Image (spheres, rainbow, N blue to C red):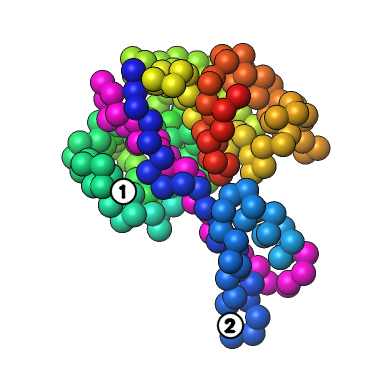
């Protein structure tokens, strides 16, 4: 049985460049920040966005950090751990739902082994993270299996080839930590309606796989945790 804490909740910081000024949108929450960003893109020629995922701490038989986040979150993650009486040396394992930099970058200040699905190693963005993770990788294989006792993984592709969902047994029931397989908005997942994009059918199959395990709670990458 594990206790789950969100170390740093998801946030989006959108901005527009106007001449020699950078104007930051006041809305920083997800998914509201995503909606604000899309509106800004429609109105301004030069826009950008920095995105933090939900960074999760699991404490039980093992101490595990899931998706520590963007490299800008290095020190905040370490401080959030310290506020809970945990130091980097206490971490037994880092688990990544996928290897995008906004989920993997903050591994730089955590020195534990890193678990992720082997299929991520074939993605074009792998070259951006492999140097940081080299020598401490634990590759997950197959469509499902065990991360550690009490935590299962299921491959849930769509956002990326090797995206996985971790199913964790907690006092509140099973929690699904699914990264960006769900999001950036949750409406399509709630309706089980495939988005109109190339990987829509694959995402729908992954959503069905998540729901089939009947989790009590879902923790996406960029949507606040919610119950089913």
**What residue is at 46 percent from the left and 18 percent from the top?**
173
Quarter of the image where the C terminus is located = top right
Residue 160 drawn above or below residue 132: above
Which is in the foreground here, disc 1 or disc 2?
1
Quarter occupied by the N terminus: top left
Q: Note whether residue 68 is visible.
A: no
How dense is the environment of label 2, judged by Cα within 10 Å: few (below 14), some, or many (20 and up)?
few
Residue 16 seen in render: yes
Q: In the displayed image of the protein, which residue is found farthest to the bottom?
A: 20
User: Horizontal placement of 76 versus 164: left or right?
Assistant: left
What residue sits 30% from the left and 29% below the top? Answer: 59
Q: Which mark is residue 94?
A: none
Element carrying mark 1: helix
Q: Is residue 20 placed above or below 226 in the rendered structure?
A: below
The span picked out in magenta is 42-68
Residue situated in front as seen by the camera: 16 or 141: 16
Gap between marks 1 and 2 measured at Cα:
32 Å
Q: Give coordinates of residue 96: x percent, y percent.
A: 43, 35
Q: Which mark is residue 80?
A: 1
* Residue reaching furthest to the right: 196
Q: Residue at x 52, y 53 (%)?
A: 11
Q: Is residue 51 left or right of residue 146?
A: right
Residue 141 magenta-highlighted? no
Q: Is residue 135 left or right of residue 167?
A: left
Name the residue carrying label 2.
21
Q: Is residue 62 magenta?
A: yes
Q: Position of residue 139 (x, y in %)?
A: 40, 27
Residue 160: give x, y in percent of width and height: 59, 35
Q: Is residue 137 above or below residue 25?
A: above
Badge 1 or badge 2: first in the primary sequence: 2
Residue at the location (43% across, 31% down)? 116
């Amino acid at each position: 049985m594990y206790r789950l804490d969100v170390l740093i909740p998801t946030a989006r910081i959108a901005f527009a460049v106007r001449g020699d000024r950078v104007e930051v949108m006041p809305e920083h929450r997800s998914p509201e920040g995503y909606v604000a960003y899309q509106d800004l893109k429609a109105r301004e020629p030069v826009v950008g966005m920095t995105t933090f995922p939900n960074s999760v701490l699991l404490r039980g038989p093992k101490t595990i950090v899931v998706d520590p986040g963007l490299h800008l979150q290095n020190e905040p993650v370490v401080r959030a751990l310290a506020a809970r009486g945990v130091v980097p040396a206490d971490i037994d394992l880092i688990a990544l739902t996928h290897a995008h930099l906004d989920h993997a970058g903050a591994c730089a200040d955590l020195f534990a082994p890193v678990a992720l699905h082997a299929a991520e190693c074939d993605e074009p963005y792998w070259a951006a993270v492999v140097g940081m993770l080299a020598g401490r990788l634990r590759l997950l294989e197959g469509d499902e299996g065990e991360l550690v006792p009490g935590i299962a993984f299921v491959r849930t592709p769509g956002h990326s080839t090797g995206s996985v969902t971790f199913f964790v047994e907690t006092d509140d029931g099973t929690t699904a930590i699914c990264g960006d397989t769900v999001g950036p908005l949750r409406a399509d997942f709630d309706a089980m309606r495939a988005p109109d994009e190339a990987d829509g059918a694959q995402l729908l199959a992954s959503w069905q796989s998540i729901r089939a395990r009947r989790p009590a709670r879902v923790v996406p990458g960029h949507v606040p945790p919610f119950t089913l």
